[in-house]
Amino acid sequence: MAISREIQTALDRGDFDAIETQWLAHSGEAPDDLDYFVGIARALVGTGESDRARFLLELLYDLLGQKELWQIRLKLLQRAGHILFETPEEGHEAILATLGELYKSHSNYKELLDKLGLNRAPQDVPKTWEKVGRFQNLMSFDIGTVVRMKGKGAGRIIDVNLPLQSLKIDFEKFPALMVGFRAASKMLIPLESDHYLVRKLETPDEMKALALKSPAQLLGMLLQSFGEPMTGAEIKTHLSGIVPDKKWASWWSTARKHPQVITRGKGRQTYQWADTTADAFEALWLAFTAAAPRAKLDLYRRDAKRDEGLAQRMVESLRELGSRSTQSDPSLAVETWYELERGGTAPKNVSWEPRNLLAEHENPFEVLRAIQDRGRRELAYAQFQEISSNWPNVYEQLLRHEQESALLSSLADAVISVQPEAFQRYTEQLISQPRKQPAAFVWLAERAADDPDLLGKSPLRLLSQLLSSLQDDRFAPYRASRMVPLFESGGTVPRLLPFIEMEQAEQAKTVISRAAGLEEYQRQALVSSLELKFASLRQDAEAPLYALPASIDTKREELRELRLVEIPANRTAIEEARAMGDLRENFEYKSARQRHEYLNSRLAALSHDLSRAQPIDLSHDDISTVHVGTRVELSAEDSPNRVLSILGPWESSPEDDIISYESELAKGLLGKKPGESCSTSGVQYTIVQILAYQ
């Protein structure tokens, strides 16, 4: 611990009066500057002036007590107690006295002192300070203290159980949660009374009113309380119950525009609160200067509108960047010019203006393909088409490298308009080798849904490539969101099947039946479509399943709900759970996968049942014999007569006197006339009369 040159000079001269004078002056100005005082005390001890060091430390010790700076005094004892007191016992007594002043208002102060053994072994100084550390940590968890726990939010300590060495905490969703002393020091963070979470817990109505009156003020309170960057999702979680979900979008849009909010990152952005607006703008400028060249363009787009002075500094920097990049990275120069043009600050008549640069460059294709931002690339494509007669050939090259669906479509439409044979060559190559350009192949498959020419070009090959791509890791980014829908009703594959020829039908059915990437209900629906078109593919017909028209409609609605709502929601849940990592211990992932298996099993069964469902005809009034859709009055010995309705398994409700035609009793009654009998479960029933079902 270094001491000042002035103090060192006084020590060298033995001018201890000067040292005392400086000590007393500094203690009046900054009694908490322990580095200064302990450094001098140790230096005095090193020169043989231990008594003088002790005297000066005693003065400081008393001064800290007078000013009630008990925590500072405790730190002084820890750092210089061996100088201040001649025996460990004296130091121990001073420690207890200082702790007493610090925590005398706490209800369990004395009991915890005894529990941790702070009254024992005063001569063991290291052990004493270890106990003090534990004691202070636990004293911060007094009854009534509000604490934060990761994953649980804020809660209030409602009990401190010293015998069990545990705390009882009331969290909003976890009331009376028990946390041991040892775990508490690692898992719990005590919160100050002005912390956002404390105010949310104690005065929620005030927080709700503040959310309406001043969104930015509430956001500032939240960000300042945590003192660290937070994502939008984290902010929304903490504001749950304060900002209504239905108002979140407008509230968040207003709050984050405040000039003291600092936004960082791209994609998963984080937010901080600067002390002043000027500090915020300076932080944004420093982040801009430190960013990579293309990142500067994104920061300019996002932050320039926040301050005119900041915008001007960014513009000057970007103009220099564009000019400097003309030779070394012409695509960056093009992107820079477009971004400046977007803000109305692009320079005129410069060599790196895209119109000039693209027209004069010896290889415009390389410049265009190297433009990284999709929007800027789209602008460059359009401008190149205006200025160059060679655009069809360059566009054909770009088709083989582009990944964005919207740009692929615009390139394709332009090429088709002047060179349709070039687009045909491109599609043939893409269908033959989809793994060379996965994104483009998925785009082509999506486009094919509304393009009969693409569907009819090579339907069996396209079907086979789509099915094999489902299992290829190169297509993983597109599988759930874009490829699976291709196999659903209305997607490309169901529209592709009508283009399958008779000689291809058997192979198509085999390919679909063996496809590992399909769900059972999808496979069954596609095979059924093929069998509907090609009767030779059909197996022996299954028995029909009779049901009332209303029941069939209900089951169809359930099927629609499964396909369009529950299964997509489950896919999303699986992806979100997978993103949490560690699938072996991931309960949410396992639960979502189990739900996935149930939903698909249910969907397959329901699809199969509906494929053989036939409505019960209630229009005819033939009641000469018992059939599905009639009511039957039965008599049995020693029992009152019963009237049963015979319907399908979907309507079966024995407690309401409705039985399924598949039941044992119904099977015995079907085809019989009034007066005839049947036996079931040891009971003989006689048909009294047959009635029409109503």
Image (cartoon, rainbow, N blue to C red):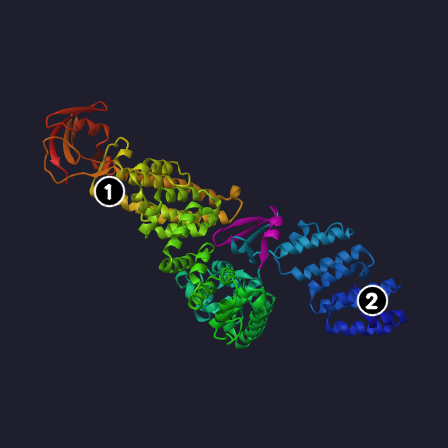
Left or right relative to 243: residue 563: left
Q: Nearer the viewer, residue 366 or 65?
A: 366
Residue 137 image position (x, y, % from top left): 64, 55
Residue 626 image position (x, y, % from top left): 14, 31
Q: Could you say which quadrant of the image residue 242 lies in? A: bottom left
Question: In which quadrant of the rendered image does the N terminus lie?
Answer: bottom right
Q: Nearer the viewer, residue 222 or 337?
A: 337
Q: Write down the region rendered in magenta.
A: 163-190
Q: Nearer the viewer, residue 554 or 361?
A: 361
Q: Could you say which quadrant of the image residue 324 lies in? A: bottom right
User: For the residue marked with disc 2, what is the amino acid?
Assistant: Phe
Question: Which residue is depicted at the point 46% across and 60% down?
Answer: 394
**Judging from the image, what secondary structure is the residue with disc 2 in?**
helix
Which residue lies under the disc numbered 1? 552
Q: Is residue 171 magenta?
A: yes
Contact check, label 1 and label 2, Cβ < 8 Å: no
Q: In this figure, what is the number of numbered marks?
A: 2
Compared with 457, 244 (above or below) is below
Q: Nearer the viewer, mark 1 or mark 2?
A: 1
Compared with 534, 9 (above or below) is below
Question: In which quadrant of the rendered image does the C terminus lie?
Answer: top left
User: For the residue marked with disc 1, what is the amino acid?
Assistant: Ile
**Judging from the image, what secondary structure is the residue with disc 1 in?**
helix
Which residue lies under the disc numbered 2? 55
